Image: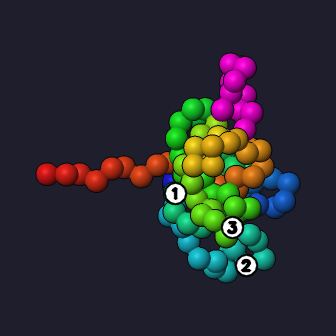
């Protein structure tokens, strides 16, 4: 978990305000959150507006503009200049890169099953 999932983190439109419980699990809106936009949601997903994964690391990416095709796909950030600044998301299944703004959220790839 991270601060974006915290029960007391609130997106005011211009900033992320946080009042503790850094690693809180996702929560439903309560009296404290009424009138705010709690940033608690699907466990494990991180808004791209909050943080990005490391460059060249495969993650699951949520790309809502791909509907009605699958909107969750493997993706990784690319940096062809070597300056450490991400240029785009590369989506292997689409065989192309998409603009940074097209991916709304990401999460780490799931661990493989433990086989006996």
- Magenta-drawn segment: 78-88
Please state if 56 lies on the left or on the right of 13 as rendered: left
Spatial CA distance of label 1 from label 2 is: 23 Å
Q: Give how far apart the Cα atoms at labels 3 and 2 are.
A: 31 Å
Q: Nearer the viewer, mark 3 or mark 2?
A: 3
Does the magenta segment cover residue 107? no
At numbered mark 1, what does the secondary structure look like: helix, strand or loop? Answer: loop
Q: Indicate left or right for 83 with 3 as reference.
A: right
- Numbered tag placed on residue 34 in the rendering: 2
Give the overall secondary structure of the magenta segment: loop
Residue 53 visible in the displayed image: no
Badge 2 crowding class, 10 Å Cα cut-off, few under 14, some 14 to 19, many 20 or more, is: few
Quick check: 31 left or right of 36?
A: left
Q: Are marks 1 and 2 in contact (CB under 8 Å)?
A: no
Asked whether 55 or 91 is in front, the reply is: 91
Task: Specify which label sits upstream in the sequence, 3 or 1.
Answer: 1
Q: Is residue 89 left or right of residue 45?
A: right
Q: Is residue 84 magenta?
A: yes
Tell which residue pokes out farthest to the right in this image. Answer: 14
Of 46 and 55, the residue lying toward us: 55
Is residue 55 placed above or below 75 in the rendered structure?
above
Specify the quadrant of the image occupied by residue 5: bottom right
9, above or below 30, in the image:
above
> Which residue is the site of mark 1?
44
> In percent of the image, x 58 and y 59: which residue is there?
72
- Percent across and percent down for residue 113 are 28, 53
The residue carrying pointer 1 sits among few (fewer than 14), some (14 to 19) or many (20 or more) residues within 10 Å by Cα, namely: some
Q: Label 3 belongs to which residue?
A: 67
> Residue 36: x percent and y percent?
76, 71
Q: SS for tag 2?
A: loop
């Amino acid at each position: 978990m991270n601060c974006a999932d915290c029960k007391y983190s609130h997106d005011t439109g211009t900033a992320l305000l946080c009042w503790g419980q850094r690693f809180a699990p996702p929560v439903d809106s309560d009296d404290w959150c009424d009138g705010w936009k709690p940033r608690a949601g699907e466990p494990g997903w991180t808004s791209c507006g909050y943080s990005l994964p490391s460059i060249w690391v495969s993650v699951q990416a949520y790309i809502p503009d791909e509907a009605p095709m699958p909107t969750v796909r493997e993706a990784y950030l690319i940096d062809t200049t070597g300056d450490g600044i991400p240029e785009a998301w590369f989506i292997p299944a689409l065989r192309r890169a998409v603009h940074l703004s097209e991916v709304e959220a990401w999460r780490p790839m799931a661990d493989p099953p433990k086989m006996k």
